[in-house]
Amino acid sequence: MKDRFGAKNQRTWLMRFHTQTAGVSLPAQQPMNNIARVAVQALAAVLGGTQSLHTDSYDEAFALPTEEAARIALRTQQIIAYESGVAQTVDPLGGSYFLENLTLQMENGAFDYFGKMDAMGGMVKAIERGYPQKEIAESSYQYQRAVEAKEKVIVGVNEFAIEEEPPHTLYIDETVAHQQSEKLKNLRARRSNEQVRSALDALKKAAEKEPKAAANGTISSANTMPYIVDAVRAYATVGEICEALRQVYGTYTEVSIT
Amino acid sequence: MQKKPSSRSNPPQVADSPISETFENRHPSEAEKHWAEKTLAPTIEKAPERPIGAPTGINVDEHGNARLTTISGVPIRRLYTQADLPADWSEEQYLGYPGQPPFTRGIHATGYRGKLYTMRQFSGFASPEETNQRYKYLLEHGGSGLSVAFDLPTLMGYDSDHPASEGEVGKCGVAIDSLEDMEILFNGIDLEKTTVSMTINSPASVLWAMYLVVAEKQGADWKKISGTIQNDILKEYIAQKEYIYPPAPSMRLVIDTFEFGSKFTPRFNTISISGYHIREAGSTALQELAFTLYDGVEYVEWARRRGLEGFL
């Protein structure tokens, strides 16, 4: 922020971040092993100085977490915070030769990518030509290849596997869908549909306009937020508001990256 | 390197032995050189290093020596020393001190000693009623913030009774259709005192508006509430694929929330730029970092074009 945008406000120089452990790393095989994986990842987040942390539940690969699994995930955080000792000193790994070397490699590599995408005219342009999508697809392929060749070991999956019962999947039935549909029906009968329609029309009009920088102390007259707030107050639904915007903006179809 | 592998019965030649990397493109200290020759070389001779996982052409080199990498495939050296840092490396210049630019050692001078990280468990499932119960449970058990997971129809901007929602309602998160559901979701939870993070992107402005109206109905002051909406549409196009509108109008909606938030909800984070989905889609650590930060650059560029420069 400082170098690129000349930001003077020091708060913009800070990297405040939340961390979530990696769902993709939690296989359904021998799921209790995931408690250990989550603990290692959460420890890395805390050593990295995160401001906020979510730890995955061990059963996330095949179901929404049970209450017990959710509690273990929270306890994992508490063990790191209160028992492990890593929170007692500031940045315990600072100055590690290994980490400082990797950090510099990451920093230089990131600036190389920045240069490439600057040349493309920014991220929206890069996305429109499929650049980051292609880069990720290539890395993902390399990783999968390594896993299949067993170059990378995933404990309990491609090594140290055991015969086990297929996991019991938590089945969420359609009760919620019926309940929600029933609520919607009642809502549409109860609310003022006239008020909803006029709020959505006003939103569409604002959405069509090109918002301009506003004068001090106000917001752009075409800013959609106040209109969305009005529509929400009139009990317009998520689907109705998004549909109004779909009518103005259309929908997006992905560029092919092959 | 074209040389043939050295015969195992002879002592390894520096040029093609595993210890050669100690000398390549770096300037080890005399002590390190001494260690490599006297301690390392005989150890490797006796017990060669082994790759983790099945040896393939990738994780062993042409001499049969193990080639170890990070999970992202970046080669890792056996040992890192001072010789692996730039010649001008100094603690003062590269690290600094916590709570002080360049903030390499963290943003708080006291690290976690003054304030622990927020333990924010992401959850949401089935109906707003059931999710509300889970939130109360988490807060009672020491969780310090809430994080809302929405179901797929909500993320895609469809109501629960839309044909496209069939089979997905309440499956991967909570189903929210209207303000009424949002009122149920936060029933009995004081939004002026709880920070709430919402993982919502394409329809972020809609769900955020619902949240603001619930807060208002509770009597909470918009100037005092704090929380976060993810609202990071760029990574949807890059990795997660839960977008509705084309990129440019989507960016406009995001900037609308920035502008609105900067005026009416100064303590609310109107975006949380995410690397998570980029990594989950199979990127390397470097790509995760680079694309995520560059997304940030793009949002700042667009915000400046809207005239939002007060934050700089």
Image (cartoon, coloured by chain):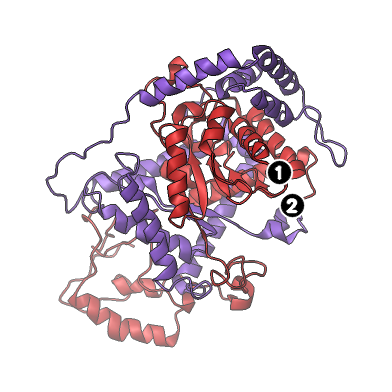
Chain colours: A purple, B red
Query: Which residue is label 2 attached to?
Result: A5
* Residue depicted at 61% across the width and 68% down the height: B108
Vertical relation: A201 (above or below) B277: above
Q: Is residue B92 visible?
A: yes
Q: Is residue B174 visible?
A: no
Q: Disc 2 sits on a residue from what chain? A: A
Residue A136 lies, in percent from the top left, at 45, 41
User: In the displayed structure, does residue A120 sit left or right of residue B15?
Assistant: right
Vertical relation: A244 (above or below) A130: above
Q: Disc 1 sits on a residue from what chain? A: B
* Residue depicted at 73% across the width and 61% down the height: A10
Q: CB of mark 2 within 8 Å of CB of mark 1?
A: no
Vertical relation: A65 (above or below) A173: below
* Residue depicted at 24% across the width and 69% down the height: B49
Q: Mark 1: which amino acid?
A: Trp
In three-dimensional space, the C-alpha distance between marks 2 and 1, rounded to whole angstroms, equals 29 Å
Residue B295: give its label. Answer: none
User: In what element is the residue under mark 2?
Assistant: helix
Query: Which residue is label 1 attached to?
Result: B222
